[in-house]
Image: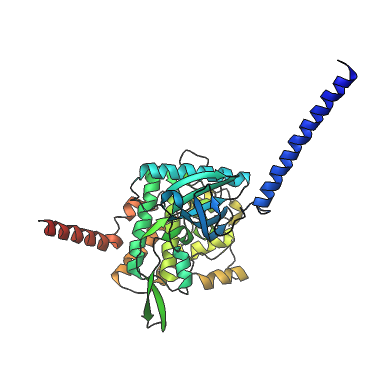
Amino acid sequence: MGKTELYSLYKGFLDCICLCLSRGNDEAAAVNERDTENGHLIYKSGDILEDRYEIVDTLGEGTFGKVVQCLDHGRGGSQVALKIIKNLEKYREAAKLEVNVLEKISEKDPHNKHHCVQMLDWFNYYGHVCISFELLSLSTFDFLKANNFLPYPINQIRRMAHQICHAVRFLHDNKLTHTDLKPENILFVNSDYSLVYNAEKKCNERRINDTTVRLVDFGSATFDHEHHSAVISTRHYRAPEVILELGWSHPCDVWSIGCILFEYYEGFTLFQTHDNKEHLAMMERIQGPIPQRMIQRSRKQRYFHRGRLDWNECSKAGRYVKAKCKPLRKYLLSHGTEHHQFFDLLERMLEYEPSKRISLSSALRHPFFLPLDYMARHYFSGQCVLLC
């Protein structure tokens, strides 16, 4: 081969590399134009994804990405919620795990009877995993906030609690732990409300018309056989076995539900803290001393001294905990039977020892829920009479 031929071959090779680099730069530029610096998809109202999902509005934003309201033209223009995951590898991988959980839920609950949000579809859009869901309404936290943190009535708490316990029991029966239960992850199907005058507070309050809820956000849900992260749950709903690094399973969800129900009842968070030792001090103030067996097994021995929590009640933090917390039964708003039944259920859900904590199957048989069983029996007997 002569010099001329070699030169032509070499030049062609260089041109090919430059073309590939140019295409790569063009694609990178296109991605940069499509995404924000931190990986969010850039969009506007009216944009259509996959020739199907027409974006109407933004519903919310989290560390994972954003949730938008869309018209699904593949379903006759019905309204759906579309979760758009950030175009970053760690969030993509987490989203694929969530899709796996949601597919399992759909497989085990095809008729949507177990109060878990239903995934309708999922797809990859230029590096963004997108998951479509039935469109729901306000979270139980957002409704509480909009209502100036006035508590839910006890009869509404009963109906919401029953659905939450039912949904999470369904997960546990299918070898799943949600691991991130909180009021923000429980959404009303319809958050329409009526205004009712509150004589005690001397103001109008919002009263939800329909207490039907759905459990959402399965991004941290973990199968029994999968690796269990050391730290799970949003701080205020974190079980003692998680803080003490004793290992965790289904009972950690039950603890979270107890914290959620307390919040519905009082209108404020039970454990308002951001520090592990302070959190444990609050638990002791509310539920009594942490069991010795748990202390001895804990990997967090620095929190303890001579088998007791190393806590100074006279310090600034100690005074804060003393002012903020009191024994659980002292939070009763009424001495009616249903209120005492409710607190009995809370005490069983907030049992320190995971092995002694009430299971959700047992919780659903608790006397607090008996009025719902009575109403169901009355309804079906009435239907039977009508049919006969």
Lateral position of residue 83 relative to residue 106, left or right:
right
**Residue 73: image x %, image y %?**
45, 51
The answer, for residue 112, to whether it is visible in the render is: yes
Count of number-bearing discs? 0
Which residue corresponds to the image point at 32% horizontal and 52% vertical from the top-left?
Answer: 362
- 204 lies above or below 11: below
- Residue at the farthest left position: 388
- Residue at the farthest right position: 3
Nearer to me, 100 or 357: 100
Nearer to me, 200 or 64: 64
Which quarter of the figure is the N terminus placed in?
top right
Which quarter of the figure is the C terminus placed in?
bottom left
Which residue corresponds to the image point at 41% horizontal and 50% vertical from the top-left?
Answer: 75
Lateral position of residue 82 relative to residue 86, left or right:
left
- Residue at the farthest top position: 1
- 383 lies above or below 326: above
Which residue corresponds to the image point at 34% horizontal and 65% vertical from the top-left?
Answer: 210
**Residue 197: image x %, image y %?**
37, 81
User: What's the image's color scheme?
Assistant: rainbow
What is the quadrant of residue 258 in the picture? Answer: bottom left
The answer, for residue 228, to whether it is visible in the render is: no
What is the quadrant of residue 189 in the picture? Answer: bottom left
Nearer to me, 176 or 312: 176
**Residue 354: image x %, image y %?**
43, 50
